[in-house]
Amino acid sequence: MNYTKIASPSNLKIKYALDVKAKRSRYRGDAFIIEGTHLIEMALTSGHRIVEVFFVDKFSAKKEGQKLLRRLFKRSDEIFEVTENILKKLTDTETPQGILAIASYIPKNLNNILLKTIPLLVVIDGIQEPGNLGTIIRTSDAAGADVVIILPGTCDVFMQKTLRATAGSIFNIPIVHTESNEIFEWLSLKGIELIVTDTDAKQSIFDTNLKNPVAFVFGNEAHGVSSQMKNKADVSIKIPIHGKAESLNVAASTAVCLYEAVRQRRKSACV
């Protein structure tokens, strides 16, 4: 396997990788960093383009490391062996796995999303905790949602904590960044009902018909869904609390809502 060795942190490839890490390149819409074997393998399996790979000699000495590198040599544009110190500069984890990659990022918009016959959409309205956002993306993927739509004020999808929380689902489900006004028009055009989660709502999710095309909106951890979303919603629902807890974590609420929709649709299909 042929690769280039880099020992200087001032190398242009390292500077570019640091630029991506700092998210300056991410805002140009072209790349983001993925760390560790699992995320890189998920990227490869999904057919995602790997631009550059950086690894240390300890990683290539392992059997599983050699196996992954062989796959990467067939699929990535460039591969570099770097020093431990350089890798630490590029990673956010305390104990790096010895490999990271720069993956390409091609922004998607609502008009090029392929929807199922009965769409199930997730709209993120100002969620700030990366772990929550990543878990919601993972749950949306698991439940078979069509897309996760990110509204302004939400934390960065491509933060390492967010990416790790997706457990690779970031490569399985479309992610679209858009504005509120654009989504209102698009949902109306597509005939998709907008449902907001609101602890003050009178209607329970379990009494709500979710067999038709729906888009769930999940809001900020502290303030909930924005007033703009509430005013535009077709339906406001709540998840009943039967114990003494004040509320559910937003990621847990997402799981309940999506799987209630899945349950209703499976039941309807069996009738």
Image (cartoon, rainbow, N blue to C red):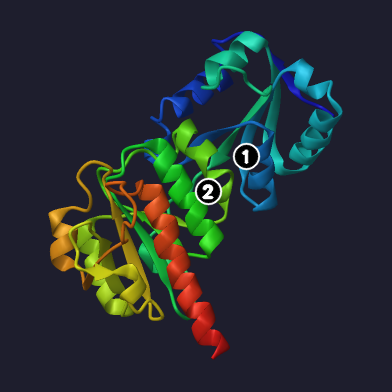
Considering the image in quadrants, where does the C terminus appear? bottom right
Q: Nearer the viewer, residue 83 or 267?
A: 267
* Quadrant including the N terminus: top right
Could you say which is closer to the camera, residue 130 or residue 205? 205
Residue that label 1 marks: 39
Dot 1 falls on a residue whose secondary structure is helix
The crowd level at tag 1 (other Cα within 10 Å; few <14, some 14-19, many 20+) is: many
- Whole-percent x, y for residue 43 in the image: 63, 45
Number of the label disc, if any, that sits on residue 26 = none
Q: Are marks 1 and 2 in contact (CB under 8 Å)?
A: yes
First in residue order: circle 1 vs circle 2 = 1
Q: Which residue is mark 2?
A: 170
Q: Quadrant of residue 255?
A: bottom left
The correct choice, above or below, for 244 with respect to 116 in the image is above
Residue 34 position within the rendered picture, expressed as x and y whole percent measured from the top left: 57, 34
Identify the amino acid type marked 2: Ile
Would you say residue 146 is visible in this rendering? no
Q: Residue at x 33, y 64 (%)?
A: 216
Question: Can you give x and y, in whole percent of width and height, for residue 252 in the image?
Answer: 41, 51
